[in-house]
């Protein structure tokens, strides 16, 4: 079934109402009509198998047939903090693929070697919404505003596991783990910008309780390292 988004405010009991841009897509692009079945997600982890009961000029009202909690969502809540990139389209790609892989939140990161530029959080949130629907998830990943590494480290105490991707091999880094312990629920993964994190930044991360992880001998681009990290954690 085709998937559409409806915020929790549009859902009441066994009925829901699709309006705004989602309704325009449903009615004018997908050409849905009364009696058609569709899947509706609320972005908070719930999916609703529904049937359109009424369509007017501004909205479509649907009857909920079945509710699916935590629909297609991983048990692990992974937040990805990645250095913003010189080429904006590459961070677009990163957000889209991170959403498909099951990320819970994305933090555009400003660090010492970040190439100057601004974040485009509104655009990235829209991309995350489209990717959520396309891949069949029910959580709309949070995309935060541009955040400095120092600010992120200051708020990192709430995570059960904190990892920073580091290109250096040897005894200083370990392979990417796969948390199997039920006590590990929330994971924060840091991936540096083009040029990586500086030695001082890595030291600051370690001082804040981060473990360094090693993704192999080849030098990976930021978007590749981010996708590889998520694929290994959420496999």
Image (cartoon, grey):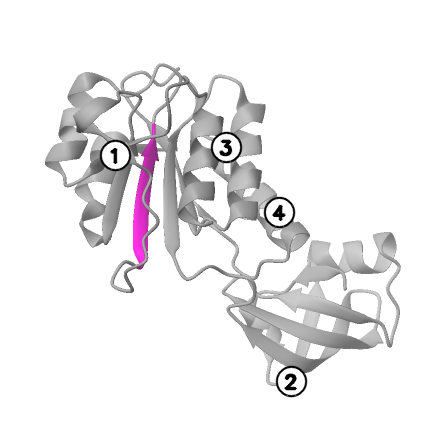
Q: Which residue lies furthest to the bottom in this view?
A: 13
Q: Do the residues labelled 1 and 2 touch (CB within 8 Å)?
A: no
Residue plotted at (14% across, 26% down):
203
Instruction: Check disc 4: other Cα within 10 Å, few if <14, some if 14-19, many if 20+.
Output: many
Labels 1, 3: front one: 1
| Picture quadrant where residue 51 is located | bottom right
Labels 3, 4: front one: 4
Instruction: Check disc 1: other Cα within 10 Å, few if <14, some if 14-19, many if 20+.
Output: some
Labels 3, 2: front one: 2
Asked which secondary structure carries label 1, the reply is strand
Q: Mark 3 points at which residue?
A: 120
Instruction: Check disc 3: other Cα within 10 Å, few if <14, some if 14-19, many if 20+.
Output: some
Of the two numbered discs 1 and 4 on the same chain, state the one appearing first in sequence: 4
Q: Which of 150 and 157 is in front in this view?
A: 157
Residue 85's x, y, as percent? Answer: 46, 21
Asked which secondary structure carries label 2, the reply is loop
Residue 190 forms part of the magenta stretch: yes
Task: Left or right? Give the position of 106 relative to 2.
Answer: left
Q: Mark 4 points at which residue?
A: 131
Residue plotted at (23% across, 54% down):
160
Residue 113's x, y, as percent? Answer: 31, 16
Compared with 56, 123 (above or below) is above
Q: Name the residue under label 1.
A: 174
Compared with 141, 7 (above or below) is below
Task: Left or right? Give the position of 212 relative to 10.
Answer: left
Task: Left or right? Give the position of 168 relative to 6.
Answer: left
Residue 143's x, y, as percent? Answer: 45, 44
Labels 1, 4: front one: 1
Residue plotted at (57% across, 40% down):
96
Q: Do the residues labelled 3 and 4 touch (CB within 8 Å)?
A: no
């Amino acid at each position: 079934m085709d998937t559409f988004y409806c915020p929790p405010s549009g859902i009441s009991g066994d009925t829901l109402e699709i309006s705004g841009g989602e309704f325009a897509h449903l009615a004018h692009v997908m050409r849905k009509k009364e009696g058609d079945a569709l899947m509706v997600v609320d972005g908070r982890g719930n999916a609703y198998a529904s049937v359109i009961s009424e369509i007017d000029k501004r909205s479509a009202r649907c009857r909920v047939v079945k509710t699916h909690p935590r629909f297609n969502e991983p048990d692990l809540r992974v937040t990805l903090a990645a250095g913003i990139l010189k080429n904006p389209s590459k961070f677009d790609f990163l957000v889209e693929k991170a959403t498909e892989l099951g990320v819970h939140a994305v933090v555009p990161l400003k660090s010492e070697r970040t190439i100057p530029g601004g974040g485009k959080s509104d655009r990235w949130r829209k991309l995350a919404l489209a990717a959520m629907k396309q891949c069949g998830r029910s959580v709309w990943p949070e995309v935060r505003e541009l955040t400095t590494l120092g600010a992120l480290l200051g708020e990192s105490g709430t995570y059960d596991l904190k990892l920073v991707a580091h290109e250096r091999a040897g005894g200083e880094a370990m392979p990417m783990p796969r948390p199997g312990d039920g006590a590990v629920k929330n994971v924060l993964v840091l991936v540096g910008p083009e040029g990586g994190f500086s030695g001082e930044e890595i030291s600051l991360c370690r001082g804040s309780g981060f473990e360094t992880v090693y993704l192999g001998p080849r030098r990976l681009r930021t978007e590749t390292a981010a996708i590889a990290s998520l694929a290994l954690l959420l496999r």
